[in-house]
Image (tube, rainbow, N blue to C red):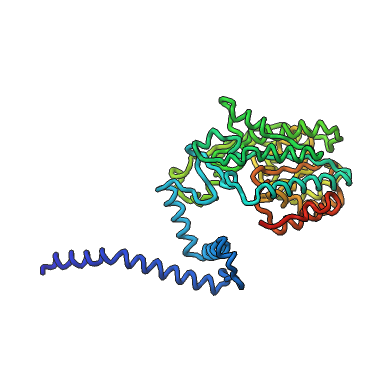
């Protein structure tokens, strides 16, 4: 056998062995990663696994979550997400693509178990909170943000939105409104914007949140509702808007899908957004389009100073995105203090605000409560049930105490 033939034979054997070698390396790397994670306490097996947990997938979900914390699976998960997107257009379990470059949150397209019951309990919670606040001389204004998939339905391009969700928003707001709670209906103004030609869409393409123009029109609608209450808004403050240069904005749905690390040419088309700067007319200092987190963390101090702001805002990341707070200040000609929390869902911001010194020592005259439509029927956790039951004692005995964790 010549040297050339021998070399080719050797290369052939090596090539045939390569898949097995790579598989062995992957298995060894995974085993080492698993052992390391267990030693570091990142994986904790449930002390008493039950048949129910196994049958419902709770056990495997928890185990998968723990395994994902290990170094090697995390790396492989990133590769899997990128490959799934490039090869099959899949964005994982939390995100779906509608029309090209339009992404939607799966939560908006899901009919949750016990959905009607969850929505009913949350409506009763709002009614109870409204009565509780009224006893303290505080007005409540509830602002429900419609689903992106509801407003931008023409951008779904065949992505199914269950018919069961069609009446969710109207049914819930009608129920709460009939019980005496003041509601701001944003669906008409945002739907009208979505139908306009040569006007920015009300929602961002690759993000769950509204656009700058969507936030501005929502804030204007809220301001109209506030003015109808005829309360003495404090402090009076005027603003001048200054447009800023557009900057590239990475949508949160791209990050949620786990593909943000890919080159930009492989991602949905980027959005360029210009956020206004709000200059107080009577002061040289300016606040950004949405007030900074540090400003919100110090919000308690504002209610105690000589200006005495008397409008507070609680809610979710919608209240902290696309200059909504700045636009609210602008249209109300005042300084609204925000206690909104990213990921606050239905109750998170309310829970923390009602227990804070800011509320207990210097309560507002008006509380604006922003709630995304998609959280109305979400499964209820024990902490939320416990919090909601605190208000049923004085407002509607026995109703919220029926809360059962899904």
Q: Is residue 234 left or right of residue 384?
A: right
Locate residue 33, reporting x and y percent.
48, 69
Q: Is residue 45 above or below residue 158?
A: below
Looking at the picture, tell me which residue is in the foreground, 327 or 9. Answer: 9
Residue furthest to the top: 197
Look at 76% across and 33% down and name the residue there. Answer: 223
For the N terminus, the image quarter is bottom left
Q: In the picture, residue 134 is in which quadrant?
A: top right
Locate residue 399, reporting x and y percent.
79, 51
For the C terminus, the image quarter is bottom right
Taking the image as drawn, is residue 199 in sight? yes
Residue furthest to the bottom: 39
Residue furthest to the left: 1
Q: Is residue 150 above or below residue 393?
A: above
Image mark count: 0
Locate residue 240, reporting x and y percent.
72, 31
Taking the image as drawn, is residue 295 in sight? no
Look at 35% across and 65% down and name the residue there. Answer: 22
Locate residue 218, reporting x and y percent.
69, 34
Look at 72% across and 42% down and name the residue there. Answer: 370
């Amino acid at each position: 056998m010549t040297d050339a033939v021998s070399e080719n034979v050797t290369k052939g054997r090596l090539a045939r062995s390569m898949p097995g070698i790579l598989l062995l390396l992957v298995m060894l790397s995974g085993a080492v990663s698993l052992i390391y994670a267990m030693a570091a306490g990142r994986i904790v097996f449930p002390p008493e696994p039950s048949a129910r947990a196994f049958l419902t997938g709770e056990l495997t979900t928890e185990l998968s979550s723990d395994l994902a914390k290990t170094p090697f699976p995390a790396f492989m998960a990133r590769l899997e997400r990128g490959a799934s997107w490039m090869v099959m257009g899949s964005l994982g379990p939390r995100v779906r693509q509608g029309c090209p470059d339009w992404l939607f949150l799966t939560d908006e397209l899901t009919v949750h178990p016990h959905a009607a019951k969850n929505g009913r309990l949350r409506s009763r919670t709002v009614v109870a909170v409204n009565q509780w606040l009224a006893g303290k001389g505080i007005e409540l204004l509830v602002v429900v943000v419609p689903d992106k998939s509801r407003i931008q339905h023409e951008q779904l391009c065949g992505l199914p939105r269950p018919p069961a969700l069609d009446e969710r928003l109207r049914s819930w707001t009608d129920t709460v409104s009939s019980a005496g709670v003041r509601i701001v209906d944003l669906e008409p103004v945002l739907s009208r914007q979505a139908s306009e030609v040569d006007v920015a869409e009300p929602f961002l393409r690759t993000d769950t949140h509204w656009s700058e123009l969507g936030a501005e029109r929502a804030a204007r609608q809220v301001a109209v509702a506030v003015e109808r209450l005829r309360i003495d808004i404090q402090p009076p403050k005027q603003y001048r808007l200054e447009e800023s240069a557009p900057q590239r904005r990475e949508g949160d749905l791209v990050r949620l899908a786990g593909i943000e690390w890919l080159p930009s040419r492989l991602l949905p088309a980027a959005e360029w957004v210009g956020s206004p700067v709000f200059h107080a007319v009577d002061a040289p200092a300016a606040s950004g389009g949405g007030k900074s987190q540090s400003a919100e963390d110090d919000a308690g101090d504002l209610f105690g100073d000589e200006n005495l702001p008397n409008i507070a805002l609680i809610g979710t990341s919608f209240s902290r995105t696309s200059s909504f707070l700045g636009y609210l200040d602008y249209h109300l000609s005042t300084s609204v203090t925000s206690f909104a929390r990213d990921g606050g869902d239905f109750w998170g911001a309310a829970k923390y605000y009602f227990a804070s010194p800011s509320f207990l020592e210097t309560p507002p005259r008006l509380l604006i409560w922003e709630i995304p439509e998609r959280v109305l029927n979400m499964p209820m956790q024990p902490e939320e049930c416990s919090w909601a039951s605190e208000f049923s004692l004085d407002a509607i005995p026995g109703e919220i105490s029926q809360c059962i964790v899904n």
